[in-house]
């Protein structure tokens, strides 16, 4: 897994890409505090473990794939 930092909030997660469609993300405990999208959902009553992703982080992961800092691994 490789670290990827969100360009919006600076939250860092660990990612692995197995294909263009499949991304594995390991969130840190700070995600519900640092990420504004997570924080908003948790404040609204969501459980942080059930939040799949945030749009800003998804864009940052896609950008990391495009610029080659996150590689797609063949399984």
Image: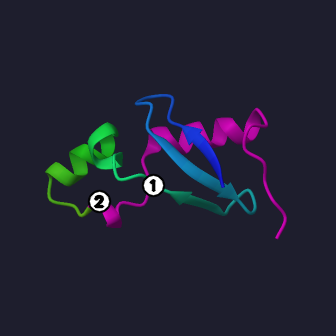
Tag of residue 27: 1
Dividing the picture into quadrants, the one containing residue 1 is: bottom right
| Relative image position of residue 73 (x, y in whole percent) | 81, 59
Reading the chain from its start, which is encountered first: label 2 or label 1? 1
- Quadrant containing the C terminus in the rendered view: bottom right
Identity of the residue drawn at 57% across and 37% down: 60
Residue extent of the magenta highlight: 48-75
Tag of residue 67: none
Find out whether residue 49 is within the magenta segment: yes
Q: How many marks?
A: 2
- What's the distance in space between the residues labelled 2 and 1, CA to CA? 10 Å
Q: Nearer the viewer, residue 21 or 71?
A: 71
| Relative image position of residue 67 (x, y in whole percent) | 76, 32
Identity of the residue drawn at 74% across and 63% down: 18
Q: Is residue 2 left or right of residue 41?
A: right
At mark 1, the secondary structure is loop
Q: Nearer the viewer, residue 16 or 29?
A: 29
At mark 2, the secondary structure is helix
């Amino acid at each position: 897994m490789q670290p990827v930092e969100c360009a919006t909030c600076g939250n860092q997660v660990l990612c692995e890409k197995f294909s263009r469609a499949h991304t594995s993300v390991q969130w840190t405990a700070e995600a519900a505090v640092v990420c504004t999208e997570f924080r908003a959902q948790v404040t609204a009553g969501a459980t942080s473990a059930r939040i799949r992703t945030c749009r800003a982080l998804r864009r940052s992961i896609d950008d990391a794939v495009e610029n080659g800092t996150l590689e797609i691994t063949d399984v």
